[in-house]
Amino acid sequence: MVVCKENPARAVTRFLVLSGFVLLASCGEVADAPPPPPPPPPPGIVATAPAPSAVTVTGARLAEAKQEGRYVPPVQVPTQPGHEQYEGTEVAAVKRVAQEPVSTFSVDVDTGAYTNTRRFLKQGQLPPARAVRTEEFINYFRYDYPAPDSREAPFSVTTDMAQTPWNPETRLLRIGLRGYDIARESRPPANLVFLLDVSGSMSAPDKLPLLKTALSGLAGELGEQDRVSIVVYAGAAGLVLPPTNDTRKIRAALDTLTAGGSTAGAAGLKLAYNIARDSFIDGGVNRILIGTDGDFNVGMTNHDDMIAKIEKERDAGITLTTLGFGQGNYNEALMEQVADHGNGNYAYIDSALEAKKVLGDQMASTLFTIAKDVKIQVEFNPTLVSEYRLLGYENRALREEDFENDAVDAGDIGAGHQVTALYEIVPTGAKGWLPERRYEDTPDTAAQDRAQELAFVKLRYKLPDGTTSKLIERPVPASLVASAKAPRGDFAFAAAVAAFGQGLRGDTLLNGFDEGNVARLAEQPGDYWRQEFVKLVGLAGALKGD
């Protein structure tokens, strides 16, 4: 029998020890009540066995549990249904400047779509078009943008232009942001909660074993002021490790984890937030890192309720990052959406090398936010630009009125992060994509009077602890059109990545610019990641038969 004392402020959590795990049971609940049955699986999903009342134990732990009279029957590992979930949107339509001169969107620093696509290509498959987000391809790579002059503005803004490699009539306008870096000794303290999926679907080598390797590496990057807790969820949620900065304890706790059971994601998320709140660091980073294949199939409450809770905790200072693993039942749609609403970033980890990149080399970018709710708005001058389209960012589009509304959530930028946006524009007088309109008006006097401005770029952002946005404004000179040449160096590579992403998405405006053209545009001296990109382009071309 477990004795539980009540706290006037809120019920004290009670914990049951079972085979090395601490299982959650809230005061006032009936300890022996059976769990509710799992909801029926959607079409194409294989149903799993009912959720057990404890985290499943296997192997030596199972034998030990039997000897001590605390055996819990293992749950059968669900078969891989080969059902992955994506929520991609259609390629953005061309906009006519005379009718829609303003483009507004939220920044995005996620990279998961690129690494997930890499996984498909290395396995000899083209990715589903809905799994490709061009902006995440572009933002996977770093470009030679200048660092900000000071921290008064947390990021620098760069604009330049080049001829479009796949269309001689159009031009590419590039907008680049680069956040300031944080030296290790200047980093704020971090309160991190690892929320780890140890359900049966995580048993594959590219899931839980790789997740443990990734977080073990992150543990080695932490300082004395940082704290890490580990929460697991399967048939039930459990606290494996209370807050500590002892790297050996963190790695030892990770080593004990094995996969088995159903996926009670909601209970795990609730417990993780409780732990994060109890260990909250004022002025520090308070973040949950979820490691999962996204298969929240048991114990999940209403989806909208879950998002509302994530947003509420975000507004209270606890952000959320998602790390995706594995294949077969991967729910990428949920992974990206949860991270977006939690003011974190989403990454897909397909190798130990990628784990080192995201949680080692780029740890500061992953964990330490320097600007939040970052929005970009571009207004094109109809005297100089007749049509445009934004390459990517379809699911980041905002209404024009959202730009000045500080209540509208947008993307965050971490320390050292970069954001790149590419617009393909049609200069006035050049052949565009849309037919001429019979009753179209000529540009008004104000547009003609500002003929030296091709466009006007505005950015809004809040400081990490701020509630009121700050504004950056930058005109784009018209002279860029006349001086635009074929893209070179960084710009050429960014254009190649954009064309590759758009091609995989089924973009019909690339004029036959295939993987061979992409490879030639991208082929230049570069780091490992850029060289790998060229190889992936070759794989895609071979799969398409180009």
Image (cartoon, rainbow, N blue to C red):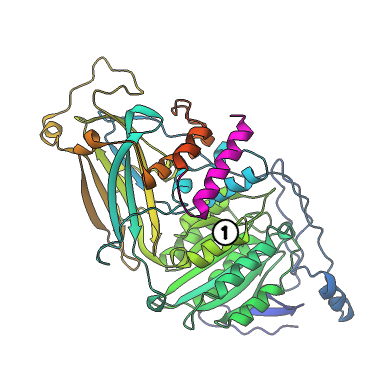
Residue pushed farthest right? Answer: 67
Task: Choose between 490 and 114: the one closer to the eye.
Answer: 490
Which residue is at 32% across, 47% downward? 175
Q: Which residues are magenta?
A: 524-546
Badge 1 density bin: few <14, some 14–19, many ≥20, Cα 10 Å: some
Whole-percent x and y of residue 144? 35, 54
- Name the chief secondary structure element in magenta: helix
Which residue is at 44% across, 72% downward? 285
Q: Secondary structure at mark 1?
A: helix
> On the rendered structure, is 324 left or right of 512?
right
> On the rendered structure, is 442 left or right of 354?
left
Q: Is residue 185 visible?
A: yes
Task: Choose between 527 and 37: the one closer to the eye.
Answer: 527
Residue pushed farthest top? Answer: 438
Whole-percent x and y of residue 358? 52, 62
Q: Quadrant of residue 386?
A: top left
Q: Quadrant of residue 442?
A: top left
Q: Is residue 128 visible?
A: no
Compared to residue 449, the image places residue 225 above or below, namely: below
Which residue is at 55% across, 65% downward? 289
Task: Choose between 113 and 65: the one closer to the eye.
Answer: 113
Whole-percent x and y of residue 297? 67, 54
Q: Is residue 534 magenta?
A: yes
Q: Amino acid at mark 1?
A: Glu
Quarter holding the N terminus is bottom right
Disc 1 designates what residue?
A: 354
